[in-house]
Image (spheres, helix red, strand yellow):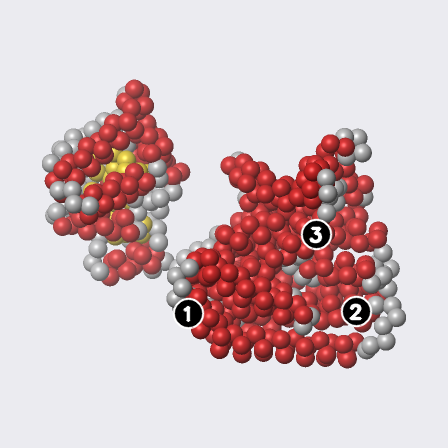
């Protein structure tokens, strides 16, 4: 093989690595999510994107994907390892508690959505068999993208995470009879639908039973044996062997590879090696999922979209809107709250990766023609590209459904300002509670305010001077003794709200001592500019405390350590106040004494 030929064979892999290592970080820097960045990169570097210019500029072929089919087969492993990690996060017991949502809500969604799409396809002139396959393929959502979005946001354990995962899990199970249906409907096949489905389900059940039985008896002893070697490489190899081998077993039985990996993860979730396995697989999963998202983006035929925008865009809208309405309605029928149902429907309304598998197989079985396949696959890829946007819109709009919290009338009573309050603590979370305890210990009277009813109720039951109200409403703060207080201590964490409170307090109370929490050094510098007396950046203060603990632990005498920490803190404060001092906005009502 020539040198040029060898380079060409590795070109696609190099483009994917370049996307993951260079393009995605750059796009992330300007606010584009990782998932969306991979999707965009795949679409841009595909044959229908940048590749459409190769007839005019042959050199561009080195920057385009030339073998998307091979790439998509490799990308499937991203979904496999994603389901493996999801299994590690669950257990058979937790999965059992979700059976009503999995088989009830998930089953209803597949049946209703698939039937509706099939009826529409039939009404548009497709034969019954083809309409049935189209409905089965397009009613499935994207497990990989939806679960990755929720996992990134750490929301898999929320009501939205449980609802969406339940539906997605049943959809993965439904792929088996759908694939069987295609083989039965294939021209020249004399096997009945019932016989084919029963045979395949028996094979699938046997495969799952083998995995569960063998896994329960062998997985824990295997990992204990490997762990005793204290060799990280062997542990990684064993982990990959378990995930890949179970995926192959289920694939051989007609199930999806991802389902086998999911079951293996469930089995390992009940062992003491759960976290170690998860830490081992996570980097591999992340990279392979990136390849998967890139592959999905490359399936978006930009040339076909530009050539036939009407049918493709109409199909895209016709897929998302009815699917959203169906999932929302079914979720409400199963007792899911309005916000959860709304956001879950927005996440699951677009199509998923299994549509590519099902429709491609139908094309190879001569059930779907090329023109119909092109329109459907491009529309499916476009809906998947829109998933991050649908997720943001769904989450934002779902908040409108959240009813206002029920407030105990006793909490809405503002305190009587008798002039005894010396400090006002704005925000009574963990930071505010500690500050309140310190003020009480030093006999300094204070009032704390917060807008979390449960938090305020619990604090008042303990006899703490905490009141409910909008902490951004300065008139409320003045009712709480701000007119006579000597200091306001701001402990909330939202930068915009902190800035607004500081500006109003400084304008209406020029002599008030304002001490505020800050996110980082840049935020602290800004707070000094708008008038705080002291700002405490979380990152700097944490690093100083860690340094103090480390130095004392290493044997350095406590006195010099504390003195150096105070000196370093003063250096940071002086540096941060520099810009504000030039503008004449910084005042120090209470000069800090250095402790040695």
Is 251 or 96 nearer to us in this picture? 251
- Residue at screen point 14% across, 33% down: 594
The quadrant of the image that shows the N terminus is: top right
Mark 3, mark 2: which one is toward the viewer?
3
Which residue matches tag 1? Answer: 224
318 on left or right of 402:
right
321 shown above or below 116: above
Q: Residue at x 81, y 41 (%)?
A: 307
Position in image of residue 295 (x %, y %): 66, 49
Observer-nearest of 32 and 406: 32
The residue that mark 2 highlights is: 183
- Element marked by disc 2: helix
Q: Residue furthest right?
A: 188
- 528 to 19, vertically: above or below: above
- Where is residue 177? Give x, y as percent: 71, 71
Depth order, front residue of 465/139: 139
Farthest residue to the top: give it: 582
Which of the marked residues, 3 or 2, is nearer the chain's N terminus?
3
Q: Which residue is mark 3?
A: 70
């Amino acid at each position: 093989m020539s040198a040029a030929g060898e380079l060409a064979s590795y070109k696609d892999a190099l483009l994917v690595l370049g996307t993951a290592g260079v393009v995605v970080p750059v796009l992330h820097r300007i606010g584009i999510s990782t998932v969306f960045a991979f999707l965009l990169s795949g679409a841009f570097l595909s044959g229908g994107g940048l590749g459409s210019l190769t007839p005019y500029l042959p050199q561009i072929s080195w920057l385009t994907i030339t073998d998307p089919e091979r790439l998509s087969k490799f990308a499937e492993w991203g979904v496999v390892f994603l389901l493996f990690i999801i299994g590690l996060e669950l257990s058979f017991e937790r999965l059992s508690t979700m059976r009503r949502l999995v088989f009830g809500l998930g089953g209803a969604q597949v049946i209703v959505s698939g039937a509706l799409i099939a009826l529409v396809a039939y009404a548009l002139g497709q034969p019954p068999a083809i309409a049935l396959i189209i409905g089965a393929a397009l009613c499935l959502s994207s497990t990989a993208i939806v679960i990755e979005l929720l996992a990134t946001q750490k929301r898999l354990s929320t009501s939205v995470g449980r609802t969406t995962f339940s539906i997605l899990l049943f959809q993965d199970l439904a792929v088996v009879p759908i694939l069987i249906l295609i083989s039965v409907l294939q021209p020249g096949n004399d096997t009945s639908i019932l016989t084919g489905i029963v045979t395949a389900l028996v094979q699938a059940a046997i495969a799952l039973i083998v995995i569960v039985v063998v896994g329960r008896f062998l997985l824990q002893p295997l990992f204990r044996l490997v762990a005793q070697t204290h060799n990280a490489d062997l542990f990684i190899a064993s982990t990959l062997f378990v995930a890949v081998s179970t995926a192959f077993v289920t694939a051989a039985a007609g199930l999806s590879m991802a389902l086998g990996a999911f079951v293996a993860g469930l089995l390992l979730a009940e062992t003491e090696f759960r976290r170690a396995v998860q830490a081992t697989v996570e980097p591999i999963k992340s990279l392979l999922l990136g390849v998967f998202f890139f592959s999905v983006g490359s399936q978006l035929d930009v040339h076909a979209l530009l050539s036939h925008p009407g049918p493709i865009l109409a199909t895209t809208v016709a897929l998302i809107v009815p699917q959203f309405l169906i999932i929302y309605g079914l979720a409400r029928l199963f007792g899911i709250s309005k916000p959860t149902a709304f956001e879950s429907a927005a996440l699951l309304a677009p199509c998923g990766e299994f549509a590519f598998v099902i429709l491609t197989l139908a094309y190879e079985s001569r059930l779907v023609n090329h023109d119909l396949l092109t329109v459907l696959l491009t529309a499916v890829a476009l809906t998947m590209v829109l998933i991050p946007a649908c997720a943001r819109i769904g989450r934002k709009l779902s908040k409108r459904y959240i009813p206002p919290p029920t407030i105990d009338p006793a909490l809405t009573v503002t305190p009587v300002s008798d002039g005894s309050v010396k400090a006002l603590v704005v925000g009574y979370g963990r930071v505010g509670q500690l500050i309140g305890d310190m003020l009480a210990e030093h006999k300094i009277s204070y009032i704390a305010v917060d807008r979390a009813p449960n938090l305020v109720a619990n604090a008042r039951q303990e006899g703490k001077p905490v009141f409910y109200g909008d902490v951004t409403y300065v008139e409320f703060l003045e009712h709480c003794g701000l007119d006579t207080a000597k200091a306001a201590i701001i402990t909330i964490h939202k930068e915009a709200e902190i800035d607004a409170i500081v500006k109003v307090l400084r304008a209406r109370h020029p002599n008030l001592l304002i001490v505020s929490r800050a996110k980082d050094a840049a935020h602290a510098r800004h707070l000094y500019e708008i008038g705080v007396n002291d700002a405490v950046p979380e990152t700097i203060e944490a690093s100083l405390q860690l340094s103090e603990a480390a130095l004392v632990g290493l044997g350095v005498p406590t006195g010099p350590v504390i003195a150096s920490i105070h000196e370093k803190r003063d250096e940071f404060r002086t540096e941060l106040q520099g810009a504000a001092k030039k503008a004449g906005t910084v005042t120090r009502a209470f000069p800090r004494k250095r402790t040695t």
